[in-house]
């Protein structure tokens, strides 16, 4: 894992990888304009998962974690993070695919499945 955005005042940790990482970084910029600071983690590997980085980030953001993935919610990145943090008292919220996936342009699919920057911004604002 790699922490890509971090400050001492972070209110939420966002964990993503691949295309959703790029959406999380877009969301970061917009959230910052709204006075919401978030920590962004690129979880480029779930086997092995970087438990130490995840625990440190969760602790620094009042145990509030949001995962975003372009994968089904069950058995993906969110579940891997949940398993890694299961003994930490973390409030984890997962964003991902909740129905049978369709084909289409990337931007349309990210919007359709609620995993684009706009959806991340909305969820982050709800959580903090």
Image (tube, rainbow, N blue to C red):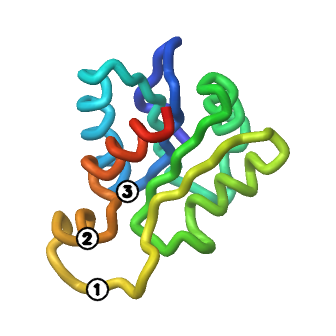
**How many C-alpha atoms fall within 10 Å of the one at disc 3: few (<14), some, or many (≥20)?**
few
Q: Give left or right: position of 14 versus 91.
A: left
What numbered label is drawn on residue 112?
2
* Element at label 2: helix
Label 1, label 2: how many angstroms apart (C-alpha)? 10 Å
Q: Secondary structure at mark 1?
A: loop
Q: Residue at x 66, y 59 (%)?
A: 80
Left or right of 81? Residue 96 is left
What is the CA distance from the residue labelled 3 to the residue labelled 1? Answer: 18 Å
Position of the N terminus by quadrant: top right
| Earlier residue among tags 3 and 2 | 3
Q: Residue at x 43, y 53 (%)?
A: 17
The residue beneath circle 3 is 18
Check disc 1 and report the residue beneath it.
102
Proximity of marks 1 and 2: CB atoms separated by less than 8 Å:
yes
Q: Is residue 126 left or right of residue 101?
A: right
Quadrant in which residue 26 is drawn: top left
Residues 13 and 45: in front is 13
The answer to which of marks 3 and 1 sits earlier in the sequence is 3
């Amino acid at each position: 894992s790699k922490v890509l955005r971090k400050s001492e005042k972070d209110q939420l940790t966002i964990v993503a990888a691949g295309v959703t990482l790029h959406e999380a970084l877009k969301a970061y910029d917009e959230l910052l304009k709204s006075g919401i600071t978030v920590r962004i983690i690129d979880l480029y590997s779930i086997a092995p998962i970087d438990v130490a980085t995840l625990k440190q980030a969760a602790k620094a953001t009042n145990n509030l974690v949001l995962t975003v993935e372009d994968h089904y919610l069950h058995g993906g990145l969110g579940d891997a993070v949940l398993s890694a943090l299961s003994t930490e008292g973390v409030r984890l919220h997962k964003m991902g695919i909740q129905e049978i996936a369709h084909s289409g342009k990337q931007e349309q699919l990210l919007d359709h499945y609620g995993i684009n920057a706009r959806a991340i911004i909305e969820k982050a604002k709800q959580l903090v």
